[in-house]
Image (cartoon, helix red, strand yellow):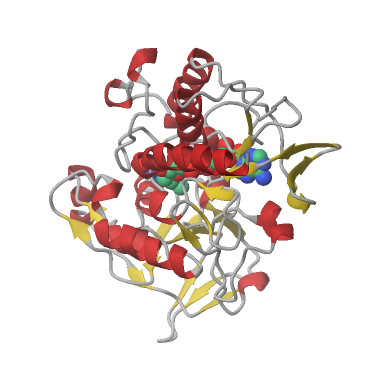
Amino acid sequence: MTSSPTHPSVVVIGAGQAGLSVSFYLQRLGLEPGSDFVVLDRGPSTGGAWQLRWDALRIGSAHRINDLPGMDAVGLSFETADRTLPAKDVVAEYYRQYEEHYNLQVRRPVDVKRVFNRGTELVVGFAEEELTTEIVVNATGTWGSPFVPWYPGLNDFRGRHVHTTDYRSAAQFAGQSVVVVGGGTSAIGFLLELENVASELTWVTRRPVEYLDDGELNMEDGKAAVAMQDEAARAGRALPSIVSGTGIPRTRRIQSGIDRGLLVARPMFSSIEPDGVRWEDGSFQKADAIVWSTGFRPELRHLSPLKLREKEGGVSVGNGSAWKDPRIFFAGYGPQASTIGANRAGRQIARQVIATLSNIG
Ligand code: FAD
């Protein structure tokens, strides 16, 4: 196998938890970063999607963040990370040191626009450049593909629509009437942060929130949610939200928000009007902003030339790669969309990549 920086055997797209974990194991299994495999990332800096998250988010405020494989050798652990600093900064710095320690040579900012076939090779195209390769590991996460459900009047709203990806800090909403949509930890985090900043706060969820009474949730423990994701990924269906299956840990902060009436959700409104939202029973809430904490979809646009999508709406993924093209691996996809899932994916996928390469050549 002859590899070079422009014709590596493997291209990893994305340097979040999933892409870094795959890279760690590829290197451990004997591939050289920068020539045998090349990692490309669109982000301006290290940290995967974490670098783009809002200022108030802290490590441990949502779920546990698992360490990357081999992170102890770098002298780092999220367990002992400073919880007073923004998670976006902590994760960006940890990943930076990790990439440097393992010399992963991530190329950024590189925004992959398309992956396609040319003869027997795969071509990964970005800007004016392209790389040719045998195998692509797609580890692009979901942050770049925010999801907002459609409601009548959505486009007529005169206020601001703000998805989780656009939320920076509560100060954006000072003195405003805000409706927060969604039943996950992000929505709850926003409500707690907006409590004394917004003039009025309304919380709506599609289903009543299920609170878990034994504290911190490791996302891997949401077995039902993970199984649902796995089933959908294998069947090629669009992936369901992880939040819908895991429940929310009832921390002291959350319980106190429930007790003082802040964290009490109304059912979903039925339509949106230029000045607010209306429920089926005719009641109305004025709104200056609607915050949509309604999740994400996997970011796969750049793979569309490969025509991997099934008619069911998703890509069929089993044992790490696409059924339709076993040279395309998916790390951090579906059931692996947590930091522990991404770590596991790294080991499994790296082994399968090596096995596939030895079959090819
Ligand atoms: P990402 O971190 O999104 O990395 C994907 C990378 O791919 C990005 O750097 C992006 O720039 C790059 N990319 C995307 N498209 C392209 C392209 N076309 N070309 C080049 N590069 C591209 N999980 C936990 O385990 N614990 C938590 O506490 C936790 N909290 C969360 C809080 C929020 C608000 C959200 C939304 C998710 C949270 N998660 C948490 C889930 C978390 O996102 C994952 O666990 C993990 O960080 C995702 O890693 P990833 O590598 O799959 O994706």
Q: Is residue 247 visible?
A: no
* Residue at the bottom extreme, as displayed: 281
Q: Position of residue 130 (x, y in %)?
A: 80, 38
On screen, residue 280 above or below 310: below
Residue occupying the point 64% across, 37% down = 11
Of residues 269 and 116, the one drawn nearer to the viewer in this rendering:
116
Q: Position of residue 88 (x, y in %)?
A: 47, 31
Q: Position of residue 118 (x, y in %)?
A: 80, 50
On screen, residue 183 above or below 59: below
Q: In the rendered image, which quarter contains the N terminus?
A: top right
Say which quarter of the image contains residue 15: top right
Residue occupying the point 54% across, 69% down = 149
Of residues 195 and 175, the one drawn nearer to the viewer in this rendering:
195
Of residues 54 and 249, the one drawn nearer to the viewer in this rendering:
249
On screen, residue 81 above or below 74: below
Q: Is residue 162 visible?
A: yes
Q: Position of residue 164 (x, y in %)?
A: 51, 50
Say which quarter of the image contains residue 124: top right
Residue occupying the point 67% across, 54% down = 303
Please state if 257 lies on the left or on the right of 20 as rendered: left
On screen, residue 349 above or below 279: above
Of residues 183 and 291, the one drawn nearer to the viewer in this rendering:
183
* Residue at the right extreme, as displayed: 128
Q: How many marks?
A: 0
Q: In the rendered image, which quarter contains the C terminus?
A: top right
Residue occupying the point 35% across, 65% down = 228
